[in-house]
Image (tube, rainbow, N blue to C red):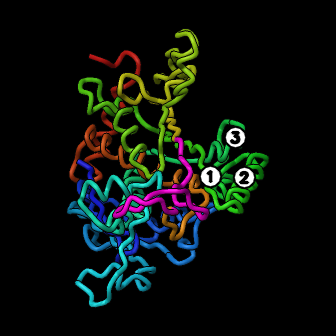
């Protein structure tokens, strides 16, 4: 079973991830993981924190001579900004008096976290609730991506909308254009409008949200299951995407649009290809039917709210006095939609890695691939018992 845990605070010494269930024999190195970490740090509208950090995950265990060995893979990402926070985030008690942070930020975890954990200072909540934690997830997602590549599965993302500026849909998506775009968008006209919207928000001390789309191709039929609620692939993906900071909505395939259409215009008719494989005439289901992958591309969209930490703070309240104050401002992005898409890729890759290993098993990648290829040979029309 592929599973992971992360630990670490935004301005602590570093971030840690431990991954269990990676089969032995899979090639893996730090450079491969670093590519996705660099992509997460990119995107127009990011904060000055991205100029400080140069994220790179050190592999501490689970890999020998460039190949996984079946034991847990542990990763460490150092926070370069730690040197500016050694007193505030010291593990040990300090003599210096540290002023508590009590000005609450609307839209953040500050109030609920302080009440839940009985804290008179929201710093501990801010530190762990920060989206800095997603660097760990992207590193884990890169390991999952490497595993999926063994099965011919690819995961990409692109920006669909920022601040109401929506990209035109072109098939297939030009992924090279996406990667070269500062807003992760293949539509050059929409890109200009998105950049302008971000600039205007930044000048006003505001922030800007949007929508990203994640697409997984090469996914075989039958991952996930219809038999229990918590094994349904769409439910697991939705939870994973909703767990990303600032994501407030997730849709699969045509999503909310299907509520306005008759069934005859929603459901994807089933066909067979010239090569004798199952296929669908359309993909409004987004590659998932009945809680299982159906062989088509898995297509997910997520709505990202504007970042709640604003350069021009909103009115708020003080945690200890209840008095009206300006919300705390430390440092913030103006727009994170392109970066959120990279995190979305990681979370989708993680879920797909989970269900691939559930379906095909194996302690060594050769065994897993043998099971996978045997399964594929039994999935064509007329091959069921």
Residue 97: percent from left, percent from top:
32, 85
Magenta residue check for 318: yes
Say which mark, if any, is on residue 166.
Answer: 3
Q: Nearer the viewer, residue 94 or 230?
A: 94
Magenta residue check for 40: no
Query: Could you tell me how far apart the alpha carbons at marks 2 and 1 are, in whole angstroms?
Result: 8 Å
- Residue at horizontal 32%, vertical 32%? 224
Q: Is residue 262 above or below residue 297?
A: above
Residue 26: percent from left, percent from top:
33, 59
* Disc 2 + disc 1, Cβ < 8 Å: yes
Pick whichever of labels 2 and 1 is earlier in the sequence.
Answer: 2
What's drawn in magenta, residue-wise? 303-326
Residue 230: percent from left, percent from top:
26, 33
Q: Which residue is mark 1?
A: 208
Pick whichever of labels 3 and 1 is earlier in the sequence.
Answer: 3
Name the image quarter holding residue 22.
bottom left
- Report the side of 212 relative to 243 (left or right): right
Q: Is residue 382 visible?
A: yes
- Residue at horizontal 39%, vertical 39%? 237
């Amino acid at each position: 079973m592929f599973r992971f845990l992360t630990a670490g605070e935004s301005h602590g010494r570093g971030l840690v991830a431990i991954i269990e269930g990676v089969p032995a024999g899979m090639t893996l190195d730090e450079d491969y993981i670093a590519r996705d970490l660099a992509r997460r740090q990119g995107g127009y509208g990011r904060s000055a924190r991205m100029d400080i950090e140069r994220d790179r995950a050190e592999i501490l265990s689970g890999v020998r001579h460039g190949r996984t060995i079946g034991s847990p893979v542990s990763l460490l990402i150092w926070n370069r900004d730690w040197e500016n926070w050694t007193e505030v985030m010291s593990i040990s008690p300090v003599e210096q008096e540290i002023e508590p942070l009590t000005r609450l930020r609307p839209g953040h975890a500050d109030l609920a976290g302080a009440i839940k954990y009985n804290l008179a200072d929201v710093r501990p909540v801010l530190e762990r609730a920060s989206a800095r934690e997603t660097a760990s997830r992207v590193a884990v997602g890169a390991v999952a991506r490497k595993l999926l590549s063994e099965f011919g599965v690819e995961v990409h993302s692109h920006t669909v909308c920022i601040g109401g500026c929506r990209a035109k849909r072109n098939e297939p998506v030009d992924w090279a254009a996406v990667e070269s775009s500062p807003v992760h968008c293949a539509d050059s006209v929409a890109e200009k409008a998105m950049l302008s919207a971000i600039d205007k928000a930044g000048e006003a001390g505001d922030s800007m949200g949007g929508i990203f789309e994640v697409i997984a191709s090469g996914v075989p039929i039958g991952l996930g299951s219809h038999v229990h609620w918590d094994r349904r692939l769409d439910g697991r993906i939705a939870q994973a995407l909703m767990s990303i900071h600032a994501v407030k909505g997730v849709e699969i395939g045509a999503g909310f649009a299907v509520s306005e259409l008759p069934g005859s215009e929603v459901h994807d008719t089933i066909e067979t290809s010239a090569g004798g494989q199952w296929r669908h005439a359309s993909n409004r289901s987004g590659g998932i039917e009945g809680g299982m992958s159906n062989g088509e591309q898995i297509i997910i969209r997520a709505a990202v709210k504007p970042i709640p930490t604003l350069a021009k703070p909103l009115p708020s309240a003080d945690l200890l006095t209840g008095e009206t104050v300006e919300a705390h401002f430390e440092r913030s992005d103006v727009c994170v939609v392109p970066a959120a898409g990279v995190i979305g890729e990681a979370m989708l890759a993680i879920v797909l890695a989970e269900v691939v290993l559930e379906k095909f098993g194996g302690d060594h990648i050769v065994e897993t691939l043998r099971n996978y290829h045997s399964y594929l040979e039994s999935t064509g029309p007329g091959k069921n018992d």
